[in-house]
Image (spheres, rainbow, N blue to C red):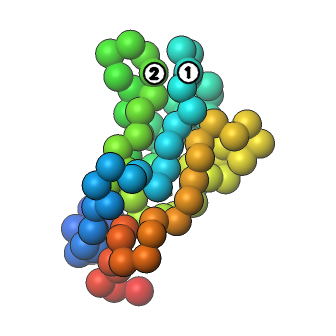
Amino acid sequence: VKVEERLFQNRYLVDAGRPHIRIKPHTEPSKALMALTHLCPAGCYSQNDKGQVEAVVDGCVECGTCRVLTAKTGEVEWNYPRGGFGVLFKFG
Ligand code: SF4
C-alpha cells in the first residue's frame, strides 16, 4: 500500500480558527522552512506567491518533523491539538 493511500485512511477533525501549528512571521523563509515544503508527510507546508512559507495544518499527522527541524530557531510554534481534535488514525 502506498503512503498516500495509508494517509487517506486517517480522519481529521479541524479545530476551526485554532491551528495547533503556527509559523512565525517572516519575509525570507529559512532553509528549515523551505525544507518543510518537501519534508512534511502531509504536505502542510507550501510557499506563497510572496516567497513566504505557510502552513495549513488540516491533515497534520503529528509526526513532529517540523517541530524537531525548527526546535533551535523557534520559527514554528507547535502544540498538540486540543482534546478531540486533530488526526484520528485508523491504522496504528
Ligand atoms: Fe507536517 Fe509532521 Fe509538522 Fe504535522 S507535525 S505539519 S505532519 S511535519
Q: Amino acid at mark 2?
A: Gln
Q: Residues under labels 1 and 2: Cα distance?
A: 7 Å
When asked about the image quadrant of residue 42, the answer is bottom left
Q: Residue at x 69, y 40 (%)?
A: 74
Residue topped by disc 1: 26
Residue found at the far right of this picture: 72
- Secondary element type, mark 1: loop
Q: Residue at x 59, y 46 (%)?
A: 77
For residue 89, above or below residue 73: below
| Mark 1 Cβ and ligand 1 under 8 Å apart | no
Q: Residue at x 57, y 53 (%)?
A: 78
Left or right: where 19 falls relative to 32: left
- Secondary element type, mark 2: loop
Screen quadrant of the N terminus: bottom left
What x and y, as percent, mark residue 92?
41, 86
Left or right: where 74 falls relative to 56: right
Left or right: where 35 falls relative to 2: right
Q: Are marks 1 and 2 in contact (CB under 8 Å)?
A: yes
Q: Residues within 10 Å of mark 2 (few under 14, many from 20)?
A: some
What x and y, as percent, mark residue 79?
56, 59
- Numbered circle sitting on residue 43: none
Say which of 29 and 25 sits in front: 25
For residue 90, above or below residue 47: below
Residue topped by disc 2: 52
Say whether residue 43 is visible.
Answer: no
Q: Residues within 10 Å of mark 1 (few under 14, many from 20)?
A: few
Say which of 84 and 35 sits in front: 84
